[in-house]
Structure formats: structure tokens, C-alpha cells
Image (cartoon, grey):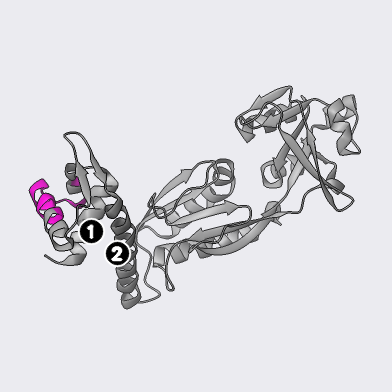
Amino acid sequence: MDRLYLMTVFVAVAEEGGFAAGARKLELSPPAVTRAIAALEERLGLRLLERTTRHVRVTQAGQRYLDDARRIIAAVDEADEAAAGINAAPRGHLAVTAPMLFGRMYVMPGIVDYLQRYPGTEVSAVFVDRVTNLLEEGLDVAVRIGELPDSSLRALQVGQVRRIIVASPAYLKASGTPRHPAEIGRHTVIAATGASTQPEWRFIEEMKLQSYKVQPRLTVTSNDAAIEAARCGLGLARLLSYQAAPWIASGDLLPVLQEFELPPVPVNIVHRDGRHGSARVRTFIDLLAERLRGDPGLA
């Protein structure tokens, strides 16, 4: 059997978690998938999958082969698209991920624009507040906020954001505007975190990093909730600048302690495509980068 075909079958079975599911994805019969996996394991002389009555699990050797097979299949797809022409209209499925609130505010409008421009495409959007593994989770493009670790991923910086303290005009009128981070202890604090009941807020004072423990009166697990509580006048909230940008522009929130802010952190579009990149990935990155670079909330 053709080796690329065997790799494709193996990747489908591994990603779908079963022979029957892999067969459905590839529109093959279950016996054909079983024969392909058996032929691949015989060719390699090792066990790629462990079967039980209910589950299929990739072996340690199989995981290494799975990573390589994904890269090879992606490279072949790239070569096919390059041969068809660099200006070919993008087609097929694209998987995109971003932080939850950033995805809703900034990435989703770009996805809608992309789908309207290119009728032959489909997009899966995964908006989660964790660092995803593009290769293991089958994702094509990610938006990352913060410094990037060394990796094989390609990155394109499209903006930057800052950590800021905000409050409503009504709260600041009633409770006063803090002029120094040490005054935060006298204010009501809203913490957008579930990790600690006593989070630390960090600032730059006289060129040095200083940390202040805060005792939140309200702790929430979403930035949306923290923004709403601050808009309602409860107290001070610490957010990324893009999260508060619409409400600062409308006057619902005001930034404080700006002279003590930490340095800004970059916003990058990262992807795992090779040198040329598929048309669907390339066109999406170009479109999203243009939109993000033109947004004042990321300047």
C-alpha cells in the first residue's frame, strides 16, 4: 500500500480515537482501515496503537510517528497547493485558536470577514484561556499574548497590550483616585482570577519591579465579569488594555496608576506552516494581521 495513504489512515485513527471513527472521517470501510494499520505496523515492525475493547491509544513509539506523519502530510498538502499556483483561492478547513475574550472581540470579526471573502473555506474557532499545542490539537493558527518561548512555530507580531488598572468614574469620585500602588490596600479590589485568594499586582517603581498583595472583595473567573463589576462601580480591576479598550473609549472606565505600568507585551499570530504555507493559512494570517495592526486597542 502507498505509504502516504497508510500515514493518513493512521493519523485519522489516532486523532479520532478509534478505527470506526477514523473510517467515518476518511469515508472508508472499517475493514479497510484495519488492514491499513496492520500493513503500516508490519512495514515499520512496531506497534503504533494499543487496542482495548472500548478505546484505541497511541503507543510511545506511535506518538513520535504521529507527529512526523502530521508534518509529512502537511508538507505534501503545501506542495500540492504550491503546484496549483500561489494565487489559488483558499479552500478547505482552517482551525484557529485565541484567548477567550480576545477571540470574541478581535479574532471573530476577522473570521467572519474571511469566510465571507472565501466561500470554499470552513473555520473551527477554539477560544480558550490556556496555551494550546497546535500540532497535538490539530490547530493551524493561534493568537498568543505575551513573550513567546523558543519553538518551531513561526510568529508575526501584530500589536502589543499592557496590564492596566481601571475603575468607573462613579467609583473614583466616591472613593478617590489612587496616586501610588501602595494606596490600593485602601480600595475595593476586583480580581479576575481563580488561582489565588490573595493575588499579587506588580508595578514598576523607580525602574524596579515591585509586587503588592491585594485582598479582593470580589474574585471572578472571567474578565468579562470583572469588567462588568468595575463598570457597575464596585472597585478597581486589573485587566489587559485591549479588554478594557471599548469601555475606556466610551468613558465607562478610567485607567489609573498609568505611570507605574509594566512594559507592554507583544501580541503575535503564530502558525506551524512551512516556508510557503497553504493558501488558506496564508490568506487568513494576512487578513487578520491587517485588521489587528490597524486596531488602536493593540497599539
Q: Which residues are magenta?
A: 24-37
In this rendering, does residue 295 appear at all? Answer: no
Name the spot of residue 58 as percent of width and height, x first. Answer: 27, 47
Q: Secondary structure at mark 1?
A: helix
Magenta stretch containing residue 150, yes or no?
no
Q: Is residue 280 above or below residue 181?
A: below
Q: Which picture quadrant has residue 251? A: top right
Tell me if label 2 and label 1 are in contact, CB under 8 Å. Answer: yes
Q: Is residue 215 above or below residue 283?
A: above
In this rendering, would 72 be left or right of 41?
Answer: right
Earlier sequence position, callout 2 versus callout 1: 1
Dot label at residue 8: 1
Dot label at residue 194: none
Prevalent SS, magenta region: helix
Name the spot of residue 235 as percent of width and height, x first. Answer: 78, 27
- Position of the C terminus, as image quadrant, is bottom right
Q: Is residue 185 above or below residue 137?
A: above
In this rendering, would 267 be left or right of 136?
Answer: right
In this rendering, would 68 be left or right of 49?
Answer: right
Total marks in image: 2
In this rendering, would 285 be left or right of 231?
Answer: left
Q: Which residue is mark 2?
A: 73
Name the spot of residue 87 as percent of width and height, x first. Answer: 40, 74
Magenta stretch containing residue 35, yes or no?
yes
Report the residue at 88% width, 35% height from top: 182
Indicate the amino acid at tag 2.
Answer: Ile
Q: Residues within 10 Å of mark 2 (few under 14, many from 20)?
A: some
Report the residue at 42% width, 57% height from top: 140
